[in-house]
Image: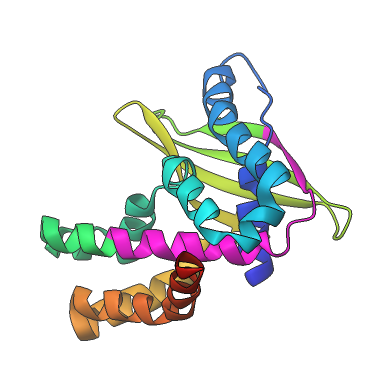
Amino acid sequence: MYRCLKAFLMCLCVVIAPTSNADEKIATEFNNKLNKINVFLEENHKQALQEPNLLIGFVNQELLEVWSARNTIRAMLGTSRWKQLTDSEANVLIKTYENTIRRYLFEVLQQYQGQKASVESVRLNDKGNKGWLRVRLESPSFPTLNVDLKIYKEQEQWTVYDFSFQGISFVKMKRGFFRDTFDKNGVVGVVAELREKNKEFNQAMAVASDE
Protein backbone atom coordinates (compact mmCIF):
# COMPACT_ATOMS: atom_id res chain seq x y z
CA MET A 1 0.00 0.00 0.00
CA TYR A 2 3.02 2.28 0.41
CA ARG A 3 3.34 2.10 -3.36
CA CYS A 4 -0.23 3.37 -3.54
CA LEU A 5 0.57 6.32 -1.27
CA LYS A 6 3.71 7.02 -3.26
CA ALA A 7 1.67 7.05 -6.45
CA PHE A 8 -0.78 9.52 -4.95
CA LEU A 9 1.88 11.94 -3.78
CA MET A 10 3.63 11.76 -7.11
CA CYS A 11 0.31 12.77 -8.63
CA LEU A 12 0.79 16.08 -6.89
CA CYS A 13 3.33 16.71 -9.65
CA VAL A 14 0.46 16.64 -12.12
CA VAL A 15 0.02 18.73 -15.25
CA ILE A 16 -3.74 18.98 -15.72
CA ALA A 17 -5.46 19.45 -19.04
CA PRO A 18 -9.17 20.23 -19.29
CA THR A 19 -11.25 17.27 -20.47
CA SER A 20 -14.38 19.26 -21.34
CA ASN A 21 -15.72 22.81 -21.17
CA ALA A 22 -17.60 21.95 -17.98
CA ASP A 23 -14.43 20.74 -16.29
CA GLU A 24 -12.12 23.43 -17.60
CA LYS A 25 -12.41 25.74 -14.60
CA ILE A 26 -11.64 22.97 -12.09
CA ALA A 27 -8.78 21.64 -14.20
CA THR A 28 -7.26 25.08 -14.54
CA GLU A 29 -7.56 25.72 -10.80
CA PHE A 30 -5.75 22.51 -9.93
CA ASN A 31 -3.22 23.05 -12.67
CA ASN A 32 -2.22 26.40 -11.17
CA LYS A 33 -1.72 24.78 -7.76
CA LEU A 34 -0.12 21.54 -8.81
CA ASN A 35 2.18 22.96 -11.43
CA LYS A 36 4.02 24.75 -8.61
CA ILE A 37 4.57 21.39 -6.93
CA ASN A 38 5.70 19.86 -10.20
CA VAL A 39 8.32 22.57 -10.75
CA PHE A 40 9.52 22.39 -7.15
CA LEU A 41 10.10 18.63 -7.23
CA GLU A 42 11.79 18.80 -10.61
CA GLU A 43 14.15 21.61 -9.67
CA ASN A 44 14.71 21.09 -5.95
CA HIS A 45 14.21 17.44 -5.00
CA LYS A 46 17.94 16.72 -4.55
CA GLN A 47 18.55 19.85 -2.53
CA ALA A 48 15.44 19.22 -0.43
CA LEU A 49 16.77 15.79 0.57
CA GLN A 50 19.86 17.48 1.97
CA GLU A 51 17.94 20.46 3.37
CA PRO A 52 14.57 19.10 4.60
CA ASN A 53 13.49 22.49 5.86
CA LEU A 54 13.34 23.61 2.22
CA LEU A 55 10.71 20.93 1.64
CA ILE A 56 8.85 21.75 4.84
CA GLY A 57 8.54 25.40 3.87
CA PHE A 58 7.19 24.46 0.47
CA VAL A 59 4.72 21.97 1.93
CA ASN A 60 3.41 24.59 4.33
CA GLN A 61 2.99 27.17 1.59
CA GLU A 62 1.76 25.07 -1.33
CA LEU A 63 0.94 21.41 -0.66
CA LEU A 64 -1.39 22.00 2.26
CA GLU A 65 -3.41 24.23 -0.08
CA VAL A 66 -4.04 21.17 -2.25
CA TRP A 67 -4.40 18.34 0.26
CA SER A 68 -6.90 19.12 3.05
CA ALA A 69 -5.80 17.46 6.27
CA ARG A 70 -9.05 18.57 7.88
CA ASN A 71 -11.28 16.87 5.34
CA THR A 72 -9.14 13.72 5.30
CA ILE A 73 -9.34 13.36 9.07
CA ARG A 74 -13.06 14.12 9.08
CA ALA A 75 -13.61 11.37 6.51
CA MET A 76 -11.51 8.87 8.48
CA LEU A 77 -13.18 9.58 11.83
CA GLY A 78 -16.69 9.87 10.46
CA THR A 79 -19.24 12.60 11.11
CA SER A 80 -20.36 11.50 14.60
CA ARG A 81 -16.84 11.32 16.04
CA TRP A 82 -15.76 14.53 14.32
CA LYS A 83 -18.66 16.42 15.89
CA GLN A 84 -17.51 15.33 19.36
CA LEU A 85 -14.30 17.34 19.03
CA THR A 86 -13.94 20.81 20.44
CA ASP A 87 -12.40 23.42 18.16
CA SER A 88 -9.17 23.15 20.13
CA GLU A 89 -9.05 19.35 19.84
CA ALA A 90 -9.78 19.49 16.11
CA ASN A 91 -7.01 22.04 15.55
CA VAL A 92 -4.45 19.93 17.43
CA LEU A 93 -5.43 16.83 15.45
CA ILE A 94 -5.25 18.70 12.14
CA LYS A 95 -1.82 20.17 12.92
CA THR A 96 -0.53 16.76 13.94
CA TYR A 97 -1.83 15.14 10.76
CA GLU A 98 -0.33 17.92 8.67
CA ASN A 99 3.03 16.82 10.04
CA THR A 100 2.19 13.30 8.88
CA ILE A 101 1.66 14.71 5.38
CA ARG A 102 5.09 16.35 5.58
CA ARG A 103 6.59 12.99 6.55
CA TYR A 104 4.83 11.23 3.66
CA LEU A 105 6.20 13.67 1.10
CA PHE A 106 9.72 13.52 2.52
CA GLU A 107 9.65 9.71 2.22
CA VAL A 108 8.30 9.92 -1.32
CA LEU A 109 10.89 12.53 -2.25
CA GLN A 110 13.59 9.90 -1.78
CA GLN A 111 11.97 7.87 -4.59
CA TYR A 112 11.34 10.76 -7.00
CA GLN A 113 12.59 10.05 -10.53
CA GLY A 114 10.87 12.63 -12.68
CA GLN A 115 7.42 11.06 -12.76
CA LYS A 116 4.85 12.73 -14.97
CA ALA A 117 1.09 12.66 -14.56
CA SER A 118 -1.96 13.91 -16.39
CA VAL A 119 -5.66 13.99 -15.58
CA GLU A 120 -7.68 11.79 -17.89
CA SER A 121 -11.11 12.87 -16.67
CA VAL A 122 -13.03 14.98 -14.17
CA ARG A 123 -16.39 13.87 -12.75
CA LEU A 124 -18.63 15.79 -10.36
CA ASN A 125 -21.60 14.66 -8.28
CA ASP A 126 -25.08 16.05 -8.86
CA LYS A 127 -24.58 18.81 -6.26
CA GLY A 128 -21.32 19.87 -7.87
CA ASN A 129 -19.48 19.93 -4.53
CA LYS A 130 -17.58 16.64 -4.79
CA GLY A 131 -15.69 15.08 -7.63
CA TRP A 132 -13.10 12.63 -8.88
CA LEU A 133 -9.96 13.26 -10.91
CA ARG A 134 -8.75 10.22 -12.84
CA VAL A 135 -4.98 10.64 -13.01
CA ARG A 136 -2.59 8.78 -15.29
CA LEU A 137 0.89 8.47 -13.78
CA GLU A 138 3.77 7.58 -16.10
CA SER A 139 7.27 6.75 -14.92
CA PRO A 140 10.40 5.15 -16.39
CA SER A 141 10.78 3.03 -13.25
CA PHE A 142 7.37 1.37 -12.88
CA PRO A 143 4.31 0.59 -15.05
CA THR A 144 1.78 3.31 -15.87
CA LEU A 145 -0.74 3.71 -13.06
CA ASN A 146 -4.20 5.24 -12.75
CA VAL A 147 -5.07 6.95 -9.48
CA ASP A 148 -8.43 8.51 -8.59
CA LEU A 149 -8.20 11.66 -6.46
CA LYS A 150 -11.30 12.65 -4.52
CA ILE A 151 -11.90 16.39 -4.37
CA TYR A 152 -14.27 18.51 -2.32
CA LYS A 153 -15.48 22.06 -2.79
CA GLU A 154 -15.80 24.14 0.36
CA GLN A 155 -16.32 27.90 0.30
CA GLU A 156 -15.45 28.00 -3.41
CA GLN A 157 -12.15 26.14 -2.89
CA TRP A 158 -11.40 22.66 -4.23
CA THR A 159 -9.02 20.38 -2.33
CA VAL A 160 -8.01 16.71 -2.39
CA TYR A 161 -9.06 14.67 0.64
CA ASP A 162 -8.72 11.04 -0.48
CA PHE A 163 -7.35 8.89 -3.28
CA SER A 164 -7.94 5.40 -4.58
CA PHE A 165 -5.53 3.03 -6.30
CA GLN A 166 -6.81 -0.19 -7.88
CA GLY A 167 -10.08 0.31 -6.01
CA ILE A 168 -8.42 0.74 -2.61
CA SER A 169 -9.26 4.00 -0.83
CA PHE A 170 -6.58 5.55 1.40
CA VAL A 171 -9.24 6.92 3.76
CA LYS A 172 -10.98 3.55 4.06
CA MET A 173 -7.64 1.81 4.63
CA LYS A 174 -6.78 4.15 7.53
CA ARG A 175 -10.32 4.53 8.87
CA GLY A 176 -10.17 1.50 11.17
CA PHE A 177 -7.06 2.76 12.96
CA PHE A 178 -8.50 6.24 13.49
CA ARG A 179 -11.91 5.09 14.67
CA ASP A 180 -10.67 2.26 16.91
CA THR A 181 -8.05 4.49 18.53
CA PHE A 182 -10.57 7.28 19.03
CA ASP A 183 -13.12 4.94 20.60
CA LYS A 184 -10.55 3.48 23.00
CA ASN A 185 -8.46 6.51 23.91
CA GLY A 186 -10.21 9.57 22.50
CA VAL A 187 -8.61 12.27 20.40
CA VAL A 188 -5.64 12.35 22.80
CA GLY A 189 -4.89 8.75 21.85
CA VAL A 190 -5.10 9.48 18.12
CA VAL A 191 -2.73 12.45 18.46
CA ALA A 192 -0.31 10.39 20.56
CA GLU A 193 -0.23 7.58 17.97
CA LEU A 194 0.38 10.01 15.11
CA ARG A 195 3.15 11.76 17.02
CA GLU A 196 4.81 8.43 17.72
CA LYS A 197 4.75 7.56 14.02
CA ASN A 198 6.25 10.97 13.21
CA LYS A 199 8.92 10.85 15.93
CA GLU A 200 11.80 9.75 13.70
CA PHE A 201 10.88 12.33 11.09
CA ASN A 202 10.69 15.09 13.71
CA GLN A 203 14.11 14.12 15.03
CA ALA A 204 15.58 14.30 11.52
CA MET A 205 14.06 17.75 11.04
CA ALA A 206 15.53 18.89 14.35
CA VAL A 207 18.99 17.67 13.38
CA ALA A 208 18.73 19.41 10.00
CA SER A 209 17.74 22.66 11.70
CA ASP A 210 20.84 22.55 13.92
CA GLU A 211 23.26 21.98 11.06
Residue at image position (61%, 63%) is: 5
Residue at image position (46%, 65%) is: 209
Residue 190 appears in the picture as rendered = yes
| Left or right of 209 on screen, residue 117 | right
Kindly indicate the quadrant of the structure image that contains residue 155. top left
Nearer to the camera, 19 or 45: 45
Residue 1 appears in the picture as rendered = no
Kindly indicate the quadrant of the structure image that contains residue 20. top right
Residue furthest toward the top? 21
Display colour scheme: rainbow
Residue furthest toward the bottom? 184
Residue at image position (32%, 65%) is: 96
Residue at image position (40%, 63%) is: 99
Residue 80 spot, x, y in % from top left:
19, 62
> Dividing the image into 4 quarters, which one contains the N terminus?
bottom right
Magenta segment includes 95? yes
